Image (cartoon, rainbow, N blue to C red):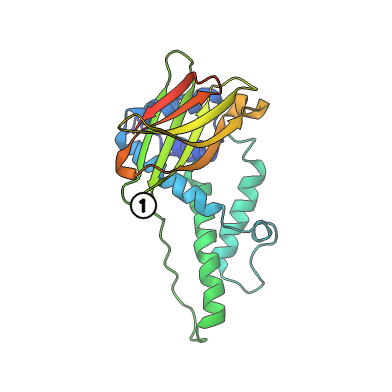
Amino acid sequence: MTADHDPQLLGAYVLGALDEREARAVEDHVASCPGCAAELAELRAVEEAMGDVPPEALLDGPPEGGDLLLRRALRQVRSERGDRLRRRRVGLGLVAAAVAAVVLGGGFAVGRSTAPDVGAVQQTTTVPAPPAGTKVGSATDPDTGARMTVQVRPAAGWVRVNASVAGVERDEKCRLFVVAKDGRRAEAGSWLVSAAGEKDGTNLDGSALIAPEDVAAIEVRNFDDERIVVVPV
């Protein structure tokens, strides 16, 4: 990334640690930067992997005598998660530490239960990449001011959608649609904007029965069928 691109902001954006002004700046930049859009999609995949870590692992850490690197990673996650709301620029360090905890934690358990005791075993970690054919995009509606960043992941004849929506007023009832190239719309989810959602935005996962190759856009509308924001993909 060039000096004009800040990778720490992408990591902080995925974790929801930016204020509204910074989040809008990231979304506007990603909308016109394919490189950062691709990196954002990868970071979202990493963030999903974080969700697989059981809460008790983050609270209690690995067993005594466990892998030293795993214990260090979990200690960093516990520390940084505790104060990330007070730190706006957590950057990529927390994401990397959490992924290390996921991968090494699984590797430690498997090694203990299935591998013979032949001394130290070298651990190999990989960052999961988004599935082939994944589409990402971001846009701000000029009329409503609403902003959305989306990731569309292909499945067998249908798609999974992750959408981060900000700039929508409290108590607005919203619907998330996947729009096909022929104009068809399939609803992928709905929600009511809370006070927190009005302030920090809403992140929503959904799915729709539209073939991946037919997806043209992701759209948010209210229950009066008024468009709030649309992202072409």
**Which of 12 and 204 lies nearest the eye of the viewer?**
204
Q: Quadrant of the N terminus?
A: top left
Q: Position of residue 166 (x, y in %)?
A: 53, 26
Q: Amino acid at mark 1?
A: Pro
Q: Residue at x 56, y 80 (%)?
A: 113
Res. 159 visible in picture: yes
Q: Looking at the image, is 154 positioned above or below residue 121?
A: above
Q: Residue at x 64, y 52 (%)?
A: 78
Find disc 1 in the rendering and name its residue: 131
Horizontal relation, residue 35 to residue 42: left or right: left
Q: How many marks?
A: 1
Helix, strand or loop status at disc 1: loop
Question: Given the current orientation, which residue lies at the most extreme top position?
Answer: 143
Res. 1 visible in picture: no
Q: Position of residue 39 (x, y in %)?
A: 37, 42
- Bin the neighbour count of mark 1 within 10 Å (Cα to Cα): few under 14, some 14-19, many 20 and up: few
Q: Quadrant of residue 210?
A: top left
Q: Looking at the image, is 162 positioned above or below residue 19?
A: below
Q: Quadrant of the C terminus?
A: top left
Q: Residue at x 40, y 41 (%)?
A: 152
Q: Looking at the image, is 109 positioned above or below residue 21?
A: below
Q: Position of residue 134 (x, y in %)?
A: 35, 45
Horizontal relation, residue 9 to residue 192: left or right: left
